Image (cartoon, rainbow, N blue to C red):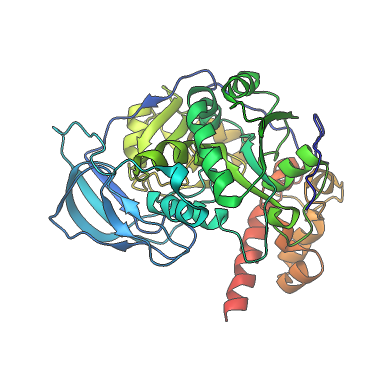
Amino acid sequence: MKLLSYFRGEAFQRGVHPPGFKHTADMPIRRLPFAPRLVVPLSQHIGRPSRPIVRVGEEVVRGQPIAEADGWLSVPQHAPATGVVEAIELRPSARGPWTESIVIRVYEASTQEVLWGAPQDMDAFPPQEILLAVQRTGMVGQGGAAFPSHAKLALPAGASVETLVINGCECEPYLTCDHRLMVEHSSDLMVGIRHAMRATGAKRAIIGVEDNKPEAAEVLRRALPPTGDIFVEKVPTKYPQGSEKMLITALFGVEIPSGKLPLALGMVVHNVGTLAALGRLLPSGQGLVERVITVAGPGVKRPGNYRVPIGTPLSFVLAQAGAQVSGAGQARQVILGGPMMGQSVASLDVPVTKGVSGVLVFRGEDMAANEGRKTYPCIKCGECVESCPMGLNPSMLGMLAARREYDLMGEKYHLGDCFECGSCTWICPSNIPLVQQFRIAKQILREKAVA
C-alpha cells in the first residue's frame, strides 16, 4: 500500500465537547503504597483466562510469573508484590461476575523491588520473537480495551503495515495518566515504538496528541530519534478523538470501512501507555506488575496520577487518595475509566486491573442534579445524529431497542459500528440512556449468535 499523506489540524465529523476537568494534568506521577493484600484476577484481558502456576501457601517475589497464558489470545500474570499466596478463589470483578483470582498477602518488610526478569537484547530478536516477548510481559491495551498487545501486533497472513499510529489523545474528561506518561516517560515510549515498528514491519510511526496537551507534544518532539520515521502531530480537541477510527480520520482524512479494522488501511493503533510500558519492560525481561491511573472527581481530596500495583483493591486506593467511603459526603458512585465510557462498580473490593486507566469518585451532592431527571420520549431533535462520530442514527436505534427489535438494529442500522462512546446519551435532551440500551442489544445479539 502506498503511504498515506497526513493532514494537520483536520477534525473528524460530529462528536461532542464535554467539559475537560483535567485538573490533574500538571500533577507528577506518584507511587501508591502497597495494600496489605492484592487480588490478581486471572481474567484481566480479552481472551481465555490465565492458568495459575502457584499454590496456596507458596512464597512469591515481585515480578514472578504466577499464572501462564492459556493459548495465543491470553497473557500471563505476574506477582505485583513480594509475599505469600493466601488463596486462589472467586473474587468480585468490575464486569459483575466473580472471577477466579490469586490473593497475595504482601510482606510489609520487603523492599518490593522487582526481583524477577533478565535483560534481553531486543534488537537481536526477529519479529516473531518480539511478539513472544511482548506476550511474556502480560501486556494488554492500557487504554481500557485490555486486548492482548502481542495479538494486536501480530499480522494475519498476507497483511502488511505501513504506519504505526500511537494514540496520545486521552479525550475522556478527568483522565490525565497518558498525558503524564508522555511528559515523564517519553524515552520509554520511543523505545516501545521502535520495538512495535520492528514487530509489525511499519515504515513510520505517528503519535497523535490532542492540541490541549502542548507540553506533551513538545516533550515528545524533543525525544524523537534522529531516524526521521517517527512523527508527532496535534489533532483538534474533541470527544471521542481517542477512538482509533476517529484518530485515523483526523490524521489522514480517511475513514475505516464499516466492519473493518485499521489494518485494512495498513495501520495498527496502540495507546501511548501500552508502548511506554513495553519500552520499559521488554529490555529488562520483566512482566507488568503496576500501571499509572488517574484518581480524580469531586469526591477525592488528593487527586492525582498514581502508580498503582495491579490487584490493589479500590477501597485502598480511595483511602490513600482521601475519598470518603462512609458517613456524610461519602462516595456515592465510583467509576472505573472515564465518565463517558467507564463503568460504575458495585463493590469497593474490586481490584485495579491492567485495563483500568482511572478511578473517579462522585458524592451524593454531585449527582443530586441528575437523580431527579426524568426520561422523556424522543422529540426527534436530531442532536444524537449530529453528535454520533460513526454517522449512525441513535434515535432510531433507541426506538428499536425499546421495542426489542434487536435483529433489525444490527442488520439495517449498523449497531455493530457503535463503539459505545456515549456521545448520544450525553447530548440527549430527553435523558434517554441510549448507549446503555445499545450495550444490552449487543449482548443479546452476541448470545443469540452463540446459541
Horizontal relation, residue 106 to residue 246: left or right: left
Query: Is residue 280 depicted above or below 243 in this figure?
Result: above
Residue beneath the point at 78% across and 43% down: 249
Image quadrant in which the C terminus is located: bottom right
- Residue at the front extreme? 124
**Residue 390 visible somewhere in the drawing:** yes
Quarter of the image holding residue 99? bottom left
Residue situated in front as seen by the camera: 426 or 328: 426
**Residue 148 visible somewhere in the drawing:** no
Query: Is residue 391 depicted above or below 119 in this figure?
Result: below
Residue situated in front as seen by the camera: 103 or 227: 227
Residue beneath the point at 33% across and 45% down: 311
Residue situated in front as seen by the camera: 377 or 188: 188
Locate residue 215, reporting x and y percent: 61, 18
- Residue at the bottom extreme? 451
Locate residue 232, reporting x and y percent: 67, 29
Residue situated in front as seen by the camera: 380 or 55: 55
